[in-house]
Amino acid sequence: MVFNVIIYKYTQVLKKGNAIMSNILRENKRWSVILGAVLLQFCLGALYSWSLFNRPLMEKFSWSESQVVTTYSITIFIFSFSMLLAGRLHDKYGPRIVATIGGILYGVGVMLSSIATSLWALYFYYGIIAGTGVGFAYVCPLTTSVKWFPNRKGFITGIIVGSFGLGSFLFKSLIATLISSKGVSGAFFYLGIIYMALVLIGAQFLKTPNEDDLVLIHEKDKKYEKSNTLKKNKVFSSGKDYTVKEVLHTRSIYVLWFIYLVGCLPGLLVIGIAYDIGIDLAHLTPSAAAFTVTVIALFNTGGRLIWGTISDYIGRPFSLLLIFILSALSMFSLGMLPLNPVLFFILISCIAFCFGGIFATVPPTIADYFGSKNYGSNFSIVAQAYGIAALLGTTIQTQTTSLNSTFMIVSCISVVGIILAVILRKITPGT
């Protein structure tokens, strides 16, 4: 009798131990996915260090500033539009294959930029080939990670897109060192090798959760909700997985498209010419102006992490409203106030912080409104606004008489974002 009781107790303990070990392994599985996603995003985020290449390219090839900056705009445009195809392929073939293709294109495009001696060659190699690679690779970690954390979309999106923003900070010193030691063309070659290797490594960790994983995720999230205030937040869900065709028949997808356009515009404009703004308007030294890349990277990353988490508690639409108010005020001040170094860095920081917030709030809003199953395809629709914003920013800059005028126009556009955020708050998910 006693022996049977001991055997029974032992069996129960063994079952409980196996269950605990199984949970630990599965929990580690989803965090290994996040690890790969973060590594991949670090490399893609180096794209935001483009302003470091502006002057070296201008000096080597006697190109104008607008001609060189156009490379960055083309890259962002191609990056966003390639996500249309990448999103479809992701939903059909999974993230690992698509991210691997993206890593190869990204690395090859940057390496080929080392032999570019004409603007059109640079536009093709860096803008189109590398830009396509970034688009293919970018959509995978974001869409995959959201599926592993369905009830903490803002938090996990903040981590993933925050890693993208941090990439420019992590690669800034390496890029500057390579430009100094190998020349601007040589720097492209070595960076291409590094980008390709790290993206390919990160891509192998990406995996869509299976049915068993989803059961565990549901159990974990129920415990998380009980121990946190998420039950009291303003985040809601349509409770349905919408196809692309169904999404295109809703009002909310178009409101979100324009929100993404208006929200990305200030950040993309400033990031592309941050170094030059510092020298021309704030009268910084070249070394101090180069520090703007670091400041933008840190606040861009901080915005993604902080706004993503905040949006889980106060709701995405209200978070977007606050972001647009701060962005409009910052752009207005940048255009109207005489800049000194301190004010310049404060305003640049605010714009980068808001820019990061857009990336941390809009993607999870799409998952809230339209579900996670077809998230890659649905997100890629809205992502097109990112590319349009890059071209729009360049167009506004080239058509205005001064940077101050450019900033004033963009501040007015940010006011439109405030109106759109108010409209979004009144729209029911899925309508």
Image: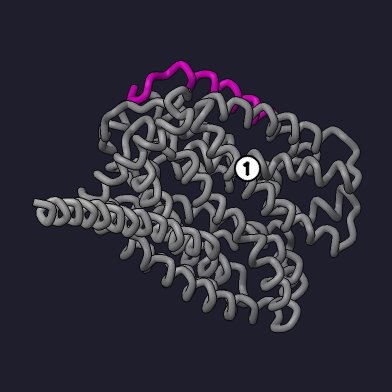
Q: Number of marks in the image?
A: 1
Seen at 50% across and 19% down, the residue is 423
User: Circle 1 — which element?
Assistant: helix
Q: Which residue is mark 1?
A: 303
Would residue 210 be seen by someone viewing this image from the given angle?
no
Residue 413: in magenta span: yes
Q: Is residue 192 left or right of residue 67?
A: left
Q: Is residue 87 above or below residue 243?
A: below
Q: Is residue 340 above or below residue 254?
A: below
Quarter of the C terminus within the rendering: top left
Question: Residue 348, image x and y in percent?
Answer: 75, 44
Q: Residue furthest front?
A: 2
**Residue found at x 86% / y 41%:** 343
Whole-percent x, y for residue 399 in the image: 70, 43
- In which quadrant of the rendered view does residue 27 lie? bottom left
What's drawn in magenta, residue-wise? 412-431
Which of the pair 80/70 is nearer the observer?
A: 80
Colour approach in the figure: one colour
Residue 360 place in picture, x, y as percent:
53, 41
6 or 384: nearer the viewer = 6
Q: Does residue 74 appear left or right of residue 226 in this picture?
A: right
Residue plotted at (91% across, 44% down): 340
Q: How packed is label 1: few (under 14 Cα within 10 Å), some, or many (20 or more)?
A: many
**What's the amino acid at mark 1?**
Gly
Q: Nearer the viewer, residue 25 or 390?
A: 25
Picture coordinates of residue 349 (x, y %)?
74, 44
